[in-house]
Every structure is written in structure tokens, then in C-alpha cells.
Amino acid sequence: MLPTDELLSHLGPSLLLLLQLQLLLPPASAFFPNIWSLLAAPGSITHQDLTEEAALNVTLQLFLEQPPPGRPPLRLEDFLGRTLLADNLFAAYFGPGSPSRRFRAALGEVSRANAAQDFLPTSRNDPDLHFDAERLGQGRTRLVGALGETVVAARALDHTLARQRLGAALHALQDFYSHSNWVELGKQQPHPHLLWPRQGLRNVAQVGDPTCSDCEGLSCPGNLLGFTLLTSGYFGTHPSKPPGKCSHGGHFDQSSSQPPRGGINKDSTSPGFSPHHMLHLQAANLALLASIQAFSLLRSRLGDRGFSRLLDITPASSLSFVLDTTGSMGEEINAAKIQARHIVEQRRGGPMEPTHYVLVPFHDPGFGPVFTTSDPDSFWQQLNEIHALGGGDEPEMCLSALELALLHTPPLSDIFVFTDASPKDAFLTNRVESLTQERRCRMANGNFKYWPFFWAQVTFLVTEDPSRVQGRPRREVLSPLRFEPYEAVALASGGEVIFTKDQYIRDVAAIVGDSVANLVTLPLEPPVVVPERPLVFSVDGLLQKVTVRIHGEVSSFWIRNPAGVSQGQEEGEGPLGHTRRFGQFWMVSMNDPLQTGTWEIQVTAKGTPRVRVQAQTSLDFLFHFGIPMEDGPHPGLYPLTQPVAGLQTQLLVEVTGLGSRRNPGDPLPHFSHIVLRGVPHGAELGRVPLEPMGPRERGLLAASLPPTLLSTAGPFSLELIGQDGVGQGLHRAAPQPCAVAPVLLELSGPSGFLAPGTEALLSLRIASFSGPQDLDLRTSVNPSFALTSNLSRVRLEQNESAWGCLWLKVPDTAASDSVVMVTVTAIDREASTVSPTHAFLRLLVLGAAPQDLCWGGL
């Protein structure tokens, strides 16, 4: 850590406070992409470390300056000398047990977008994006542009896109200190003009200025010539290195073998990758301070509320409604209004107040428009203006409306669909399924957007009553299987379909408020009801407010705790909890504190009843998949949307709420392995040990998933197994199933925004790693802009790839700040049972003049 007295005259008051804190830097010294890179260069500081630590520092500053409502203010001295952890910050500010999952997921988006710059073909070799090849002015222009685009996207409430642009900007900013000679010039504070475009970069080396001498060895401490000009190294062959210029350096830099040999990068502690490895720590310190500056400037431009939304600095969820507005939906619409009003009034001003509201109406034949806001009063006013009007035969355009809601709903959110009709647009089922899962990893603006385990969970509240025909004159001739698309989407998203009747809808709709309260779903064994066999679930000491929901033609059920105490289906208060019944829907709220151990549920019913057990806890986990990239200049983990057949895949797990302990002195919980189960029947596919990555308190774990384990054609679920600090079992399940993609499908586009009246070129890559593939390729865009492609069918052998182009025309009438979603679907022509593979590209139309993006006004 640099001495703070050398920085005081260069940093504003907001940064002076942060320099007193113990920053999360290893004792040895990265600018490698992510934590996986440490396998190649142990002790290095990665782009992921720098990004997350800077965000934590500025978040702490926000908490110190904005005392929490109804709680004592935070004190700086309580954090001095301590490692900053998101869980600890949230517990101190919002209260013990407040989940930091959304905040950590948002940081994952930013840090993975940052790391993506080193992997993707559209960015990894572009010197402007890494301050290489002495393109310092061009790099600063791209850096400032990405920060301006972050502000524009955040103000348009497209926070996923804003985080992607922020990650790209931070990558370039951090690379400046590793790839240039700023550190070698003896500078001990960030460059004073790098984030301010109206100030020129001074004393920059020109084309004819020699900058480096020849260096034979891996380590090159004295290869820079004695001068005071700012320079950076050349990498690879494009552009070629002029005589006398420095190289980036390292094993994989082709330019480093041309005189003058060697290089000047400080990316890691390894001399094989970084000839100036001895200055790695100094470069990392400056990059961290510069990243804190960037986050602080964003906070200044967006305001505290806008900045908090950008990084999801809240334990609360969003609230999204998709409402059928046909004439028969009066009771359902009123139920939605009552629940929304209750949530708004009960949580206003508190930590669990929703941060984002989405409303999408639909009927026959229309749907939309989408209404989004962060203002609860505006949401309530818009919702209150919706009434049940008109008729229209069943079915309705439900999935089209749901797709629109998914495009505008933040990750880790719940969407509630109120309808009494089946979908007319059932052909969208598979695409909507994929869209609910797509938020684990998305390509946008030419770069992947990475984040661990993001999903939108969809719950359908269906008032299906065959005896009611008003407004639905064709109900009696429709297929009894017409609601299967809802079942498929609910299964894919980790949600559920609840059938009820008008007289119960207001009571059943109370699950909306419960779901917004950050519940986890407990795994059941077996996961579905089997006649005369009890369902088993585990309760640990970190769970509270457990709720059991049973739905179906139930004749009887009982619940038994580990001590053998049972409670039946009788309504009212029982020995274990309170039971309520609304038609075929039962809800049992268990009494706290619950006895830990193995619980049982026995259900007797016609058909296949559904059982769901949920609880509140801050101990949960996020995850994402990836492929190790260990043979290039920037080793790290290349994240994937989902596992791909034939590829050796890594699973990275991030445990949240590790600070949750029954007693403050107990050791931290730990997790030992991950279990894969087939969906929906729960057969165990395999279990894989988990290995810690980095300090234990960060909760980062990894597991290697061999191709043989991922050979299943159907979906699978993930369960995390471990123990708490006193040795009692812990069991957590991901609420949304995963699936193995038969091919790798990648879609990329321009690095900036779209403008009305322009045409954008998009690139498509499709690869097979498991065997021959004969695929049809289909494209779509929402809204319906003109889209053409030069690739409609492809045949691939194993380990073969194909590339294609798409042209997207943005009409002159395109609305500014509107989201465009391009979808490419690959369909196996020979195997009808294989689910299609989808690639999604999210773009933003911007109608503002270029000067409106100016970052220099800060």
C-alpha cells in the first residue's frame, strides 16, 4: 500500500476517507482477468480483485455518509484494519442477516465484463481497449466513452448494460497502470487527467522516440531508456512494433522476440508473463485508487440513489407484474393491486422496499406497453389505472407479455403473472424458458456480460375455473394441456404455477409479498410426491420463517419434525405452525425457532400434488460456469451461459451470508461438495468435491465437471452440501435448473449504442465439441426491426466452428433509450427431442447527441 501522505494533495475528500481503510490486497502481488488466473500466477492481484475492492470502498463511503433509517450510523473505526466484505457491510448497515446476494451478483456482472475484455475476439487484441501500442490518446477516448455510456444506460434504467460498459471501462483504466510506464516514471498517484477528457495527456512519446533497450531474460527491470515521456508496450503483430519501441512482453507476445526484446507489463507476479513483475504491487495500488476514483465519479454523476441502483446496493428484490386485462379478470387485477399496495406501504423507506417496478398488461390480440420505474408512487398510479375491459376468446398473448417483462426485469427478481387464460403464443415457450435462464451470462455490445447465477423466477397465478365461461366462449373446446407452456416456463425459471379460483385469489396472491422477502427454496427428497413415501427436507440453525405450500387435490397431509411431533391438515394453529387453506392451496407457516434436523411431509392426494418448502436465510449461493483459458497471454476463466456438451467445464460457486452464525464465536460455515440431480425426478447424476479459491471468508469455491458428468440431455439442478461452524449439516439448492447446450452459440455486436437510422453489423459463431451437428438457424428481434442473416443452416463435425453475419437496421422512428433484443436459435434438424440453443444480444438505442455522453463535465 502506498503511503497516504503522498496522495493527500491529489485526491478529493471522498477518497481521503477510503485510504484509511485496510484494502483487500494479498501480501504478495494481477491484472490477470479473474481469480482463476491465480493458478498461473499465484499471489497476483486480478482485475476482479481491483473492481470488487474499489466498489466495496465506495459503498462503505456511501454507508458512512448516509446513515441507515432507524439504525445507528456506521463508524469508520469499526472497519479500520479489517478486510472489507459485502456480507459484513450489509449486516452493519441494513441489519444482521440482510442478504448481500444482489449486490454481490451486480459486482459479478461488472467484474466479469471487465475480465471479458481479455477473452473475446472483439476486444482482446484491440490496443485501444488496453492502452497498448502507445495508443494512449485513443485509449483514453474509449475509456471516457465507456464511462459516459455507463451513465446513459443507468439513467435509462438498463443497469445490466450499464454494468457491462462499466466493466469495460474499468478494465482499460486498470490496464493503463500495468501496460504503460506510469509507475516506472516514479508516479505515486493516479494520472490526474485520465478520467477528464478536456485535459490533454502530456509528455507522450512520439512515433520516432526510442523507448526500450534489449532484454534477454524473462525479468527486465532496467530496459526502459532514461526519459520522462509516457509510453506503453506493443503486443502481438497488429500493429507492428516500430524500431526501438517497448513490447508488452511475456511468453505469448510475438513482438517481444523482436529487438528490443523483453517487455514492460506488470500484469502479474510471474516473470514468464510480466517482465516488470517486480512493480506489480505498485501498479495494482494505483489501479485500485483510480478505480475508486471512477466509482466515486459515477456516484457523483448518478446521485446516491442512482448509484445504489447501478450496483444493486440493497437486500430488496424488484416487483414485476404481468397482468391479463380482459373482462373476466376483475378479481385478479384487484388482488394484484392489493398486494402491490401492501408491499409499497409496508416497506416504504425500509431496506426491503423494492428498487425497481415493472408492469406489462396483455389481452387478445395485444400486449404491452411495458412500464418501468423506480418510484413506488408512479408504479401504483400506473397499476391503479388498469381495469378489466373487453373480452376476447381464450387464449391470450401471455408469453409475449412475459418476454417483454423479462427484457426489463433485473436479474435475481420475481415476476408474477395473473391470468385466467392459456397462451395463444405457445410457440414462444422455449425462447421464454431460455430467457429466464439467460441472465447467468449474456452477450451485449460485442462483449459477454458475466455474472454468477442470475435468474428471473416466474410464478403464474391462474384462476382457471371450467364452470366460468363469461368472456371465454371457446373455453370448452380448448385442449386440457393448454397450460403446459406455463408449467415449462415455471420449471425452467424455478417458479411455479398455482391454480385457484376467484374467491381465493386475494389470499393466494399473498405469496407475492412472501417472495419479495428473499426466500430460498429447500431441496426435497424425493423432489416430487411419491405415493406412500414421505418427502424429506433438512432444517439448519440459519433458517427462519419456514413455509410449506401444498397445491393439488389433497385429501390429507402431515408434517413431522425431528423429535417426532406431527401436525395434520387441520386449519388454524397446530403444534408446529399455523395452517391456512384456500381451495386446493394450503400454506403452513412454521413456528420459530425450528428444531434442526430432518423433517418429513406425507401427502395423500389425487394426481400429482406439488409441495414447496421455503425459508428466509442470508446463507445462499451464486454460481456460474466457465472454461479454463490457461494457454494464452491472459489466463483465466472464460464464462459460459451454460455447460456445453464435450467441453471440460468448471463450476464456480460464490457463497453469500458466510457471516451468518448462530453464535458470533462459531467458526465459518463451509461447503464440501456439489450434487447434480436430474429434473424433475431428482435422480442423483453425480457429486463433485469443491475446492476453495482464495481466502475462505470470500466464499469462492470451484468444482471440475467432466464431460461425462454433463452427458445428460435433460435439465439438472445443483445442490450445495456442507456443515455449519458446529458440525451440523447445511443443504442449499439453486432454485433454477440448468441444461447442457449441444453447441456453443455466440452472438456479438457493436461496442457502443445504436442510433436511429443506422445499420449495425452483428457476428455469430457456432461450434460443436461433442459430434456432428446439422442445425437450422433462426433469428428474431424485439421490437420488430429489419434483421437479415447470411447463415440459415450449418453442418458441423466435432471440434468444428462456423461463422456468420447479421445486419440489424434501426429505423429513424426508433425510440431513444429503448432496449433491442436479438435472438438466434439453433435447432437440431435430426433430433427433435434436443432443446434448441439460444444466443441473446441486448442493445440500447440512443438518440442523444454525442456531446450528451461527455464525461468531462464531472
Image: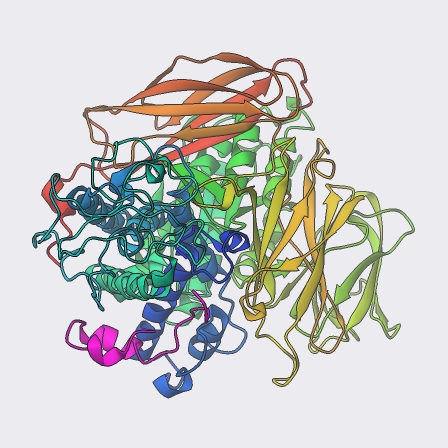
Q: Is residue 388 above or below residue 48?
A: above
Q: Is residue 1 above or below residue 406?
A: below
Q: Is residue 16 magenta?
A: yes
- Nearest the eye: 238 or 529: 238
Q: Main secondary structure of the magenta part?
A: loop
Left or right of residue 270: residue 852: left
> Percent x, y for residue 16?
24, 77
Locate residue 54, reporting x and y percent: 35, 65
Answer with the quarter of the image where residue 306 lies: bottom left
Residue 36 vs residue 295, the one in the foreground? 36
Magenta stretch in the rendered image = 1-29
**Along the viewing direction, whichever of 580 and 762 lies nearer the viewer:** 762
Residue 803 is one of the magenta-drawn residues:
no
- Residue 185 vs 795, above or below: the answer is below
Q: Is residue 812 visible?
A: yes
Tell me the quarter of the image containing the C terminus: bottom left
Q: Is residue 800 left or right of residue 156?
A: right
Identify which residue is drawn at 30% across, 76% down: 18
Q: Examine the rendered structure and indicate whether residue 819 appears above or below residue 803.
A: below
Residue at 48%, 46% in the rendered image: 635
Residue 49 at x, y = what percent?
42, 61
Task: Specify whether 12 is left or right of 40.
Answer: left
Position of residue 386 measured from the top left corner of the image (x, y, whole percent)? 38, 45
Residue drawn 32% across the image and 45% down it: 248
- Residue 451 vs residue 583, the one in the foreground: 451
